[in-house]
Amino acid sequence: MKKRVFILLLFVVLKGIAIAQVSENMSLLANWDDNTLPVHSGLVYNDIWGYAAEGREYAILGSAQKVHFIDVTNPASIQHIDAFPGGASSVWRDMKTYGQYAYAVADQGMEGLMIFDMSNLPASVTKVSQITTFFVRAHNIFIDTQTGRLYVAGANSAPNGIVVLDLTSDPANPTLLANVSLPGGYVHDVYVENNQAYCSHGGNGLHVYNMTTPTSPVELGAITDYPEIGYNHSSWRSGNYLVFADETHGRGLKCVDVSDLSDMVITDIFRSTLLAPTYINSIVHNPFILGNYCYVSYYHEGVQVFDISNPDAVVRIAYYDTYPTNTNYSGYDGCWGVYPYLPSGRILGSDILNGLFVLQLSFSPLPVEWGLLQAQEERGDIVISWSTLTETGQCEFTVERSADGRSFVALCTLAGPAQPNLSELNYSYRDRQPIDGVNYYRIRQTDPDGSIFWSDMVSVEVAVPEKGFLIYPAIVHEGQEFNLLLPPGEWQVALYQNNGQFFAQQHLSGGRTVWPTDRLSPGIYVLHAINQLTNTQYAGRLVVK
């Protein structure tokens, strides 16, 4: 089947200069650019990251002097919420998120690690700490959300290795797990998944380490001699394949089969060259993978999207040039970063001089297009329901719950349709034993190739009864469950009919217990609880209709 390619030429005025804006299968929704920000070494902006909560979406944008938080939920009305100076001017900034917190580093000055609390968005953001204990300067950070560890690359305190911090105990006050040297030496950037770290060692290639014991990393494999070798800059993995970028003019992106880390194989080399055939020495910066697509920030070439579903023949399917005035590929100008993981499917891009770009593909890139997600209390249970608008491939959904919005446990897994579906589908799950207090829920969607995506997060609060002993609801229909709340301790609970006839007995520990009524006939019942240590007694009435 022939692929239709749509080329859009729009003549716009950017920074007072009439230019031709070029795109393919991607459109501009919004551009934010503050002309009052200072220029440092020819740069105004650097990296970009994203964040989503409570149905809203945000950009976290770095500039030479500050970290900016921007509400991009409505691209027609972008709201700059706040900006925080770190204390220095830096060409390089990097930001990542973990739960409600954002973390930022700079590779010039002595800013250390800045930590921001985003729980009050969209109203405000708070800088909760700026820590210089572990390092004062770093090039990049990456957070392994599966283990709650923050990895620091290019830190001044680890010139030949990496710094690992623990976020699980207190995300606002990380603790040091390791400052360790690695066989590959200096780490420019790192991608980590479940303790497996893919380190870009610049001129020493790509090395993979098992970081389960961070003080004693184990090298699992390396790729140090390959076609079009350059400065190994950054990488991203999904399933059995990884894409890495060499930040050297004229070098292509590499797609790598990493199913066997002891024998990693480059399956394809691909590139963008909008100025070909006059110039073909383009230079790439950062790749990210979502589903079958690799999103790339390309100096001079903007945001590029490649289809990697066939890793032996990668094909470019979309782009948007954020710096269309370039006439050659000399230097390092144009697009710095890209973030493709917003729930809406919108793409964030950052351009060194032209600021924040909010972009939209002309087709749905996500394996699942999410509809409504909600959680509601119902007779002591919490019902989580969600819908999908489209599902492009067979997948499964896992309901996950958390007490703090950071550490999640799986509750159940549901299968999606066996074939692609282009109409709305509805799913639901009843949590019969929610946590007293706030319950956070999200849906983990898993593709057959192992790629994982998450929905937005919702929360619902289960009121903690003030009384130590409580039956709720006290009136139920036949077959419906009810909840029994007991104070701490060990209890003998007996159920009697209203006429005093004994019906059933259970030994229970304190807390909440779900009690079925499928064996109870309509009528009035009395529950009698005796604490086996203190002999404290409670009684309550239950009505079954």
Image (cartoon, rainbow, N blue to C red):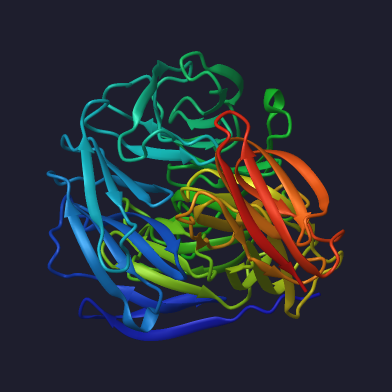
What's the residue at 64%, 67% (across, down)?
379
Where residue 146 appears, as percent x and y from the top left, is 55, 39
Where residue 201 appears, as percent x and y from the top left, is 45, 28
Instruction: Report whether 499 appears left or right of 135.
Output: right
Q: State the quadrant of the N terminus.
A: bottom right
What's the residue at 56%, 22% (across, down)?
212
Q: Is residue 259 above or below residue 484?
A: above
The residue lying toward the viewer, choosing from 208 and 68, is: 68
Q: Is residue 300 above or below residue 216?
A: below
Q: Is residue 157 above or below residue 98?
A: above
What's the residue at 36%, 63% (across, down)?
59
Where residue 170 appears, as percent x and y from the top left, is 36, 36
Instruction: Report whether 219 appears left or right of 432.
Output: left
**Residue farthest along the front direction in this orientation:** 499
Is residue 308 visible to the viewer in this orientation of the structure? no
Is residue 483 visible to the viewer in this orientation of the structure? yes
The residue lying toward the viewer, choosing from 25 and 477, is: 477
User: Which of the 4 image quadrants contains residue 138?
Assistant: top left
**Residue farthest along the top direction in this orientation:** 216
User: Which of the 4 image quadrants contains residue 240?
Assistant: top right
- Total tally of numbered discs in the picture: 0
Where residue 424 appears, as percent x and y from the top left, is 73, 79
What's the residue at 73%, 52% (across, down)?
412
User: Which of the 4 image quadrants contains residue 367?
Assistant: bottom right
Q: State the quadrant of the C terminus.
A: bottom right
